[in-house]
Image (cartoon, rainbow, N blue to C red):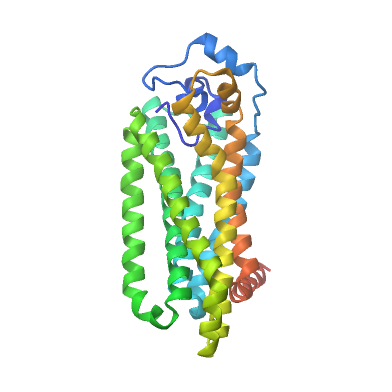
């Protein structure tokens, strides 16, 4: 397919060089003209070595695998919030896996070690794009879910366990993943319709606004509410809940920084696909993809930094693995 959500390697390959996602063609069923291509090339086109994508992908993959294993291993981390964080780590793993698989195929192809038929390449692109699209949709969904979970913890502390039961948490996880995979499959196979990009961008902004409103309400009223909870000798729980909210605020901020340029890219495709300034912005697409991979790499570091329990379990896993290797 021409429109790829993971086209950083395709930019170096002739049959993907005219991807409408990169250059912002307003007619998604036709390639851009040679003149448009030359105008886009006048801007600084940042090219990233495949080795960089592979290295970042492998590091983020290992990090997120360790996070998932740590949460599974430590019973103290089996709360709904950490289950959602585990799913967030799996979402990051989708980006890492798709990046590593695609990079390896591209490197093998470029060096003439494997020959791929166009139909096989198209199927591979579809699978990779569905994985990446599922990652962004599920990541946004779980960030919103965690925000709602922290909101309930802070403002409905005494009823939290009756509201956020294990069964409800499991149901939320199943629904989010099912919806993410279904929506992503739909997005990829109907990519020629502008409505698909509009839906994706709208979902991005709606989830951000929803999460921001929850956080704003939490931080504005937390001080007053904390006094009320302290009267019931629940100050420690309040502090823990607010720490979790701050952690998720950091995660949301990193997500916006890393994914924001990509979604701005999509917005410009819809609003000014032929504008010279927009075309210059499109030429930085490789940098946007590096930021996306960095999001998957940074998230595990935030988990470990903000959670002493998770950090302790991660150290045990790393030392046990090192001891086993030695």
Pinpoint residue 136: horizontal percent, then vertical percent. 46, 47
Q: How many marks?
A: 0
Q: Give the vertical position of 160 relative to 88 (above or below).
A: below
Screen quadrant of the N terminus: top left
Q: Is residue 264 above or below residue 74?
A: above
Residue occupying the point 55% across, 51% down:
255
Which residue is painted at 58% across and 78% down in the image? 239
323 to 91, vertically: above or below: below
Q: Is residue 307 left or right of residue 326?
A: left
Please provide percent x and percent y for residue 30: 39, 17
Report whether residue 33 is seen. Answer: yes
User: Could you say which is closer to the camera, residue 56 or residue 183?
Assistant: 183
x, y percentage for residue 257? 60, 46
Residue 45 position, x and y percent, is 64, 25
The residue at the far front in this view is: 224
Q: Is residue 123 above or below residue 228?
A: above
**169 horizontally vs 220: left or right:** left
Q: Nearer the viewer, residue 275 or 172?
A: 275
Q: Residue placed farthest to the top in the image?
A: 35
Quadrant position of the C terminus in the picture: bottom right
Q: Nearer the viewer, residue 166 or 217?
A: 217
Q: Is residue 191 visible?
A: no
Q: Quadrant of residue 259?
A: top right
Q: Is residue 151 left or right of residue 230?
A: left
Q: Residue at x 40, y 78 (%)?
A: 160
């Amino acid at each position: 397919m021409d429109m790829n959500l993971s086209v950083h390697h395709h930019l170096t390959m002739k049959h993907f060089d005219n991807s409408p996602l990169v250059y912002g063609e307003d007619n998604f069923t036709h390639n851009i003209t040679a003149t448009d291509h030359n105008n886009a090339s006048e801007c600084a086109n940042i090219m990233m070595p495949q080795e960089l994508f592979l290295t970042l992908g492998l590091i983020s993959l290992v990090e997120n695998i360790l996070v998932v294993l740590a949460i599974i291993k430590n019973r103290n981390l089996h709360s709904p919030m950490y289950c959602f964080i585990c799913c967030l780590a799996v979402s990051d793993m989708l980006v890492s896996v798709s990046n590593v698989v695609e990079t390896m195929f591209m490197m093998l192809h470029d060096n003439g070690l494997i020959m791929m038929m166009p139909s096989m390449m198209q199927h591979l692109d579809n699978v990779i794009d569905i994985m990446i699209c599922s990652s962004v949709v599920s990541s946004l969904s779980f960030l919103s879910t965690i925000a709602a979970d922290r909101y309930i913890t802070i403002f409905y502390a005494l009823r939290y366990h009756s509201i956020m039961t294990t069964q409800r948490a499991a149901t939320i996880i199943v629904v989010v993943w099912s919806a993410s995979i279904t929506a992503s499959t739909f997005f990829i196979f109907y990519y020629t319709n502008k409505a698909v990009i509009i839906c994706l961008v709208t979902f991005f902004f709606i989830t951000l606004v929803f999460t921001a409103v929850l956080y704003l309400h939490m931080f504005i009223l937390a001080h007053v509410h904390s006094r009320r909870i302290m009267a019931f000798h629940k100050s420690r729980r309040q502090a823990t809940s607010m720490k979790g909210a701050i952690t998720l605020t950091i995660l949301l901020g990193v997500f916006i920084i890393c994914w924001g340029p990509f979604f701005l890219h999509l917005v410009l495709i819809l609003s000014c696909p032929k504008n010279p300034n927009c075309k210059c912005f499109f030429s930085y697409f490789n940098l946007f993809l590096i930021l996306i991979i960095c999001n998957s790499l940074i998230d595990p570091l935030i988990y470990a930094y903000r959670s002493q329990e998770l950090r302790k379990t991660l150290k045990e896993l790393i030392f046990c693995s090192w001891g086993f290797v030695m």
